Every structure is written in C-alpha cells, then in structure tokens.
Amino acid sequence: MSTFIPPNERRVQSPHLPFGDQRGAPFYGNDILSVLQFNREDLDYIFEVAKEMRAMVERVGTFDLLKGKILANLFYEPSTRTSSSFFSAMERLGGSVIPINEVHYSSVAKGESLPDTIRSLECYADVIVIRHPEVGSAKLASEYAQKPVINAGDGPGEHPTQALLDLFTIMEELERVDGLTVTMLGDLKHGRTVHSLARLLSLFVVRLNYVSPEILRMPSELIEDLSVQGVSQKEFRELDEVLPETDVLYVTRVQKERFEDPKEYEKAKGAYVITPQTMQKAKDEMIVMHPLPRVGEISMELDQDPRAAYFRQMEYGLYLRMALLAMVLGKA
Ligand code: NCD
C-alpha cells in the first residue's frame, strides 16, 4: 500500500508538530514565497506583531520566544541586509542560525541539487530562508521542504519580505497608504523589490509612477495585472515630471549582475542621481526609500535630510522579520 504523501501536504500531516495547539496560529507552518499570498487583514496582523517586536527590542533587546529553534540562512547570492537582519531577528528571539553565505564552500559547489540541499538542511533547522539567482527557486525549495521556507529574493522575481518591510516603513512614516502617490525609480525591469512592492501596494488605493530608462521599464505583465485590478499606473523617463506630487520616492540601483550585455549596463547606469538639489522640488512631507545597496543613485549629502528614510527602513526590517519568523514557527 502506498504511503506516499505529496510534498505540499506533508507539513500538515507531519507527526512532528510541536507541543501545544499552535496550528490555529496565523501563518503557522506557512511558506512565505510571494506577496500574492497576503490580503489587507494579514498585513494589519503582521504589522501589529512587528510593532510588538519593536516594543520588546526597545524594552529588553533579546528575549526567548524562539529559544531552541534553528534557522538555516541559505544565500546563493550576495546579501548584507537581508541575511544579517534575518540572523539578528532569530538571535533577538533567542533562537540560533546556521549561516550559509558562501555557497561555494558548501556541497552546492560539488554539484548538489537545490532539493537535496533543502532536504539536508531541514534535518537540522526549523525554518529555511533562501536567496537564489533563479526565479521560482524558493517555490521549488518549498515543494521539497516540510519546514517553512521564506523567499529572500529569487533572481529578478520577488522579494516578499522586503516588500512587507517597505510597506511597514510607509505605514509607520506616513501613517497611511491609501491616497498616496508612490514613484518607483531606476531598474524596474530587474528589481525584484519593486516587483513585489507594486503588487503589494495594489491592495491599496494608490497612484504608481514608474520612472526608468526605456530598456529598464517595469515588466508589461506586471503592469497588465495591476491594470486589471484597477490600479492607476503611469510610466515616465524623467523624474522632474512627477517628483512634486510624490509621497514616496522608491529608488533602486541598476542591477549590474542581471545584464547579459555589459555595454547595456554602462548605458543605463547613472541615469538618475538624487541630490539635495533634486529634492528642492519634492514635498516637505514625503519620504525617500531605497532597499540598498546604493551605488551612486542617492548622494550621501541627502542622508541628513529628514525625508531620507532608507536607514530607518532597515531597522523596520528587523522587527518585520522577527514577526515573520515568530509567526511561521507558531509563536505569534
Ligand atoms: C535588494 C535585493 O537584494 O533585491 N537588496 C536587499 O535585499 N536589501 C536590492 C538590490 O540588490 O538592489
């Protein structure tokens, strides 16, 4: 008699559920693969938990909510903020981390497949965070894993946890999302952060402006999907036209590593540089965001401007990722 259980159903039927009825907790055991899995109610819940995390960090720094839990932090692409914020989030919750940043030193360099790496890591860890250069890689990992998988960026595909922290930043800084004009600037073709953020913002009543060089326009499938949802979207080549009406200016770098032809990169880089002079045309009450790293798109002189929110954005990311880890492990 076959006892085969398809990979996706195993998690629910696992005999290894922790003690206590955590199965009713929102997101317990869930993967986080795409922003498409969230509705506005979910977002309210996640942001409430993130605010609690902030209060706890401010009060006690580190606490034992995830004591005994282990995170496998598997990064096939470079990362500073995403990997270290997940690391810090797990440590602040009293858990521990298996960091795999230099995939060249692991068995992947010997030719191991992603499914085998995932099946191995989940023997040692309770949750897996994965960043990988191919679109769909996090979903593939989740099909083989019984433990929750969190997508920390799948090539030019999605970056759902970044979009959640970006939205949390907007909510905390401007105290609303409905009614805002959000201008996304830079490499909108390859930037997974803007792909995820635009889709997440489509749950709200917003106006989206896309400013990019011709060759780095927002993918047409995304624009079509959002049009069907009734989102107001406009494309521009110059920032000047839309800066005065902008409430959130979301700047991105030109993603050198995703260009097939280096000459195309050379043509596109440096297309936009935000300086204090640029910002003279912007509202007083608006924010400038960037997922970072920046490679020249925002001058360092802008860092003193109170509208420059990109360093605060990173801190919001810590609380948001603490919330997500606690939730998928059934502790929030
Ligand atoms: C972004 C990413 O990796 O997609 N960075 C991040 O996660 N904070 C943006 C980028 O690399 O340009």
Image (cartoon, rainbow, N blue to C red):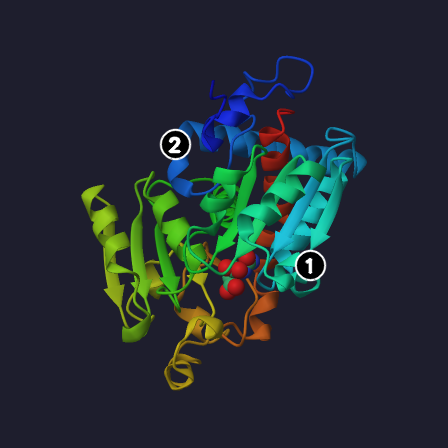
Q: Is residue 105 visible?
A: yes
Q: Is residue 307 visible?
A: no
Residue 253 horizontal/vertical position (percent)? 47, 69
Along the line of sight, the residue nearer the viewer: 175 or 327? 327
Q: Nearer the viewer, mark 2 or mark 1?
A: 1
Residue for point 36% across, 64% down: 188
Residue 294 horizontal/vertical position (percent)? 55, 70
The tag earlier along the polypeptide, 2 or 1, is: 2
Disc 2 designates what residue?
39
Crowd band around label 2 with a 10 angstrom C-alpha radius: few (<14), some (14–19), many (20+): few
Three-letter amino acid code at disc 1?
Answer: Ser
Q: Is 267 above or below relative to 292?
A: below
Three-letter amino acid code at disc 2?
Answer: Asn
Residue for point 54% across, 16% down: 24
Is 56 left, or right, of 30 in this rendering? Answer: right
The label shown at residue 106 is: 1
Residue 16 horizontal/vertical position (percent)? 65, 21
Residue 176 horizontal/vertical position (percent)? 43, 40
Q: Is 187 above or below relative to 63?
A: below
Is 67 left, or right, of 148 in this rendering? Answer: right
